[in-house]
Image (cartoon, grey):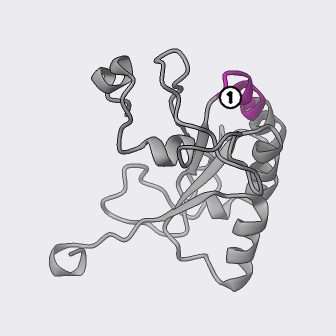
């Protein structure tokens, strides 16, 4: 979330490094490019977009807000519709798109969508449960252009801590 007071005063916030990349460089922050300088004015600061690319998940965690299962759900965007969404986000100059879910890595076209996002100047990030990541998938994550990967590690009591 954007801290409105800091936004209006032009101050940096703790999420700016993930939202805009490291300060002091320029560009949009796709794979292999420099990252964008933190904007100083409120009109230049755009929100990060979280896109739940699928409800499907390879796990069925009790605490999860999506109440997902490893099955096909109706109403999800096709590859073409996803690319159209990314076109719109790029036109709006969204600095980063967080690919989330469900579990985004179960989506067969996830790497195609991420490469498309990079080509459009968007900075793709990933939120995953991490259980599907092996050496091959880790290499695909890097090659596709993800600039940040967050792995959710959840449990209760001492397990979580």
Q: Left or right: where does residue 36 sit relative to residue 130?
A: right
| Quarter location, residue 60 | bottom left
| Quarter location, residue 52 | top right
Foreground pick, 97 / 69:
97
86 part of magenta stretch:
yes
Q: Residue at x 76, y 43 (%)?
A: 117
What residue is pinned by disc 1?
A: 89
Question: Looking at the image, is 20 positioned above or below residue 159?
Answer: above
Question: Looking at the image, is 119 positioned above or below residue 112?
Answer: above
Q: Position of residue 141 (x, y in %)?
A: 70, 67
Q: Left or right: where does residue 94 sit relative to residue 10?
A: right
Quarter the N terminus occupies: top left
Foreground pick, 107 / 33:
33
Q: Left or right: where does residue 152 sit relative to residue 122?
A: left
Q: Position of residue 39 (x, y in %)?
A: 53, 28
Question: Looking at the image, is 69 positioned above or below residue 93?
Answer: below
Magenta stretch, main secondary structure, is helix
Q: Position of residue 86 (x, y in %)?
A: 73, 34
Q: Left or right: where does residue 129 sit relative to residue 142?
A: left
Q: Position of residue 142 (x, y in %)?
A: 71, 68
Q: Residue at x 74, y 51 (%)?
A: 114
Q: Residue furthest left?
A: 157
Per the image, label 1 sits on a secondary structure element best described as helix
Foreground pick, 129 / 143:
143
Q: Residue at x 68, y 46 (%)?
A: 29
Question: What residue span does the magenta drawing correspond to?
Answer: 85-93
Q: Residue furthest front?
A: 24
């Amino acid at each position: 979330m954007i801290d409105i007071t800091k936004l209006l005063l032009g101050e940096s916030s703790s999420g700016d490094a993930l939202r805009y990349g490291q300060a002091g460089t320029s560009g949009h922050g796709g794979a292999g490019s420099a990252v964008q300088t933190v904007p100083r004015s409120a009109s230049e600061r755009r929100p990060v977009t979280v896109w739940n690319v699928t409800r499907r998940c390879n796990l069925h965690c009790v605490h999860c807000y999506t109440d997902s299962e490893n099955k096909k759900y109706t109403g999800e965007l096709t590859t073409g519709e996803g690319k159209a969404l990314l076109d719109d986000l790029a036109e709006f100059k969204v600095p980063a798109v967080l690919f989330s879910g469900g579990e985004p890595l179960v989506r067969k076209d996830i790497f195609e969508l991420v490469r498309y996002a990079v080509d459009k100047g968007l900075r793709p990030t990933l939120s995953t449960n991490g259980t599907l990541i092996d050496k091959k998938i880790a290499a695909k994550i890097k090659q596709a252009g993800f600039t940040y990967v967050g792995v959710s590690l959840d449990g209760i009591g001492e397990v979580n801590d």
